[in-house]
Amino acid sequence: MHVTGTVPQSAPAPQETPAAPDPGSNGKHARRFGLPVATALVMGNIIGGGIFLLPASVAPYGTVSLVAFGVLTVGAIALALVFGRLAERDPRTGGPYVYARAAFGDFAGFLAAWAYWITTWVSNAALAVAAVGYLDVLIPVNDHRWTACLAALVIQWLPALANFAGTRYVGAVQLVSTVLKFAPLLLVAVGGLFFFDADNLGPFHTGDGSAIGAVSASAAILLFSYLGVESAAVSAGEVENPRRNVARATVIGTAGAALVYLLGTLAVFGTVAHDELVNSTAPFSDAVNAMFGGGWGGWAVALAALVSMTGCLNGWTLLSAQTPHAAAKDGLFPAAFARKKRGVPTFGVGVTVVLASLLTVYNYTFGSAKVFEVLVLVTTFTATVPYLLATAAQLFHLVAGRRELVDRGRLVRDALVASVAAAFSMWLVAGAGYAAVYQGVLFLFAGVLVYAVMTAGLKGRGELRE
């Protein structure tokens, strides 16, 4: 094991590393993703539960949150471009973990894997909580805390079952759900502009703090809606021709999601009165009801939102197992995470859904009334760790100037994009707030103890490289 911060000498140069299929990736239930499915994976994971609930979550900050959305979009595109370039260089499953370990050694790789793993299962819990708000439009479940909790657990476990069935079914569910979710989003994003009323926008900035502080705080919440830009890179080993398709899927998926996001959020702000939006649990349903009157439109949007969130959970459940799978193959996670069946790291899927379920129960039992916002801010901090390490890896390669890893013709552009992505990630740490950083650091420090145990085991077996 290499721990000094340089590229392990025994490892081949990343550009020579083939994206070889893992054992357990073959069979009739395992199938590699082409460009359409890889793009659907990115868009499906980005456009999930976040967009359907976040307009209400940021409404208390005022319309200044729309400025945050614009800034966030620039940062998300920068991250997408960085992940695309890194995947061209090293198209193995694992995403940020692979990039951080290649550049800085095992400890950095482990931190990226650990933080990303935390992000995925906490995000799954947050998505399930958001989905319950739309399920309540169809079936009253929010009247009782335990009914809502049970609904959130069912919503988490259904996508997990699809993952246990194999990548063939994961890809099918992802493609169908991504197509279906665009109907309500485009209805609100485009149709809502014809019903736009500036009087519904409310104040530009609310509260006693500065407008810049409000932009940072709302951006920290909104980041949740952009988690997933790394989806194709994390699953690169399951993508056909990953050097070409991962970069394309990442950029196309992120740009498409950003356009829908900006138009959709603006339309919701302009169709739902600000006072109502602040307390809404299903803002897109409220927007359609405001546009057409009655409850049928809101009911249809709620159904589509549930399909969207289920598809998003389907993709995130796969991602939650991919990074620890890659780390386990290198001995940095327990060996059980390396096992695959039907193309899916089933042990990782099982552990992740159990942890997300326990977190869901805990938050419904002891958490605050704003369960979704609490979970979102924790993932905001933990997500910035692998994002920062990945962008730092890109900057490391660019500054080191190794000819086999750097395209000299794109050096200045790549350096600028990586710098924007790094600054963007640091800004999000500041916007997450003290409570989220506090909880996130506790999660990270727990990971340091796990790393100590894992590396001690490797050293005891003589597998630790000095």
Image (cartoon, helix red, strand yellow):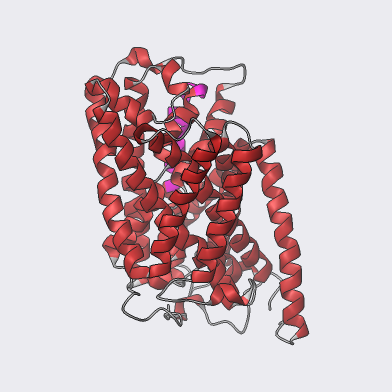
x and y percentages locating residue 382 in the rendered image: 60, 50
- In depth, the one of 299 and 343 nearer the eye is 299
Which residue is depicted at the point 65% across and 36% down? 433
The magenta stretch is: 60-76
Residue 99 visible to the viewer: no
Looking at the rendered image, the quarter that the N terminus falls into is bottom right
Name the residue rendered at 42%, 80% in the picture. 21
Residue located at (70% from left, 85% from top):
463
| Relative depth, front residue between 141 and 437 | 141
In depth, the one of 363 and 317 nearer the eye is: 363
Tell me, yes or no, whether the highlighted magenta stretch contains residue 71: yes
Relative placement, left or right, of 466 versus 411 is: right
Tally the marks: 0
* Above or below for 450 versus 130: below
- In the rendered image, residue 66 lying in the magenta stretch gets the answer yes
> Where, by quadrant of the figure, is residue 275 drawn?
top left
- Magenta segment main secondary structure: helix
